[in-house]
Image (spheres, helix red, strand yellow):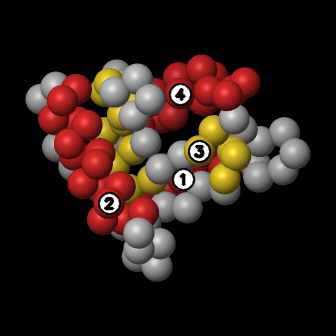
């Protein structure tokens, strides 16, 4: 899961920030994505188009400065590594809520 903003100081702060973003933006999918999050989502869906081989269990739906990704288990490690690298290159925060940790 990725968002725009200052990188939290630690995993605990990142978890709190993630929960706040999730509550705020997941409940309001009508909020248009920011330009940066839209570009990030576009890059991800370009890498893995939404077809039968895509890793998405749910099509990525950016909202405001936030993108929550639902990924099939069999591709989770590959997708996590790529999304973290891409997020870092775009100066986005990347957090894994299952592992409760910031990704580099």
Q: Residue 52, located in which quarter of the rendered image? A: top right
The reply to whether dot 2 and dot 3 touch (C-beta < 8 Å) is no
Q: Disc 3 and disc 4: Cα gap in Å?
A: 11 Å
Instruction: Please identify the quadrant where the C terminus is shown.
Output: top left
Distance between the Cα atoms at labels 1 and 2? 20 Å
In the shown orientation, is residue 10 left or right of residue 96?
left
* Of pointers 1 and 2, the one earlier in the residue sequence: 2
Separation of marks 2 and 3 at Cα, in angstroms: 16 Å
Residue at 25% in and 37% down: 15
Residue displayed at 54% across by 46% down: 69
Q: CA distance from mark 2 to mark 4?
A: 22 Å
Answer yes or no: do the residues labelled 1 and 3 have beta carbons within 8 Å? no
- Does 12 sit left or right of 4 as displayed? left
- Looking at the image, is 23 positioned above or below residue 7? below
Q: For mark 2, does the 10 Å Cα neighbourhood hold few (<14), some (14 to 19), or many (20 or more) residues?
A: few
Query: Which of the image's four quarters has the N terminus?
Result: top left
The residue carrying mark 2 is 23
Nearer-N-terminus badge (2/4): 2
* Frontmost residue, 92 versus 15: 15
Vertical comparison of 67 with 16: above or below: below
Instruction: Kindly identify which numbered label has been placed on residue 80.
Output: 4
Q: Is 97 left or right of 9, judged from the image as shown?
A: right
- Please tell me which residue is depicted at 70% across the width and 46% down the height of the picture: 57
* CB atoms of marks 4 and 1 within 8 Å: no
The answer to which of marks 2 and 3 sits earlier in the sequence is: 2
Picture coordinates of residue 38 (x, y %)? Answer: 48, 61
Mark 3 is surrounded, within 10 Å at the Cα level, by few (under 14), some (14 to 19) or many (20 or more) other residues, namely some
Give the label, 2 or 4, closer to the camera. Answer: 2
Placement of 62 over or under 92, stated as above or below: below
* In this rendering, position of residue 60 left or right of residue 92: right
Q: Which residue is mark 1?
A: 41
């Amino acid at each position: 899961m990725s968002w725009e903003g200052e990188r939290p100081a630690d995993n605990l702060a990142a978890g709190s920030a993630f929960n706040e973003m999730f509550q705020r933006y997941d409940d309001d999918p009508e909020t248009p994505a920011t330009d940066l999050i839209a570009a990030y989502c576009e890059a991800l869906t370009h890498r893995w188009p939404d077809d039968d081989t895509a890793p998405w269990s749910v099509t990525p739906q950016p909202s405001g400065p936030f993108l929550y990704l639902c990924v099939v288990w069999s591709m989770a490690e590959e997708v996590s590594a790529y999304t973290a690298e891409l997020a870092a290159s775009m100066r986005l925060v990347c957090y894994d809520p299952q592992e409760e940790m910031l990704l580099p």
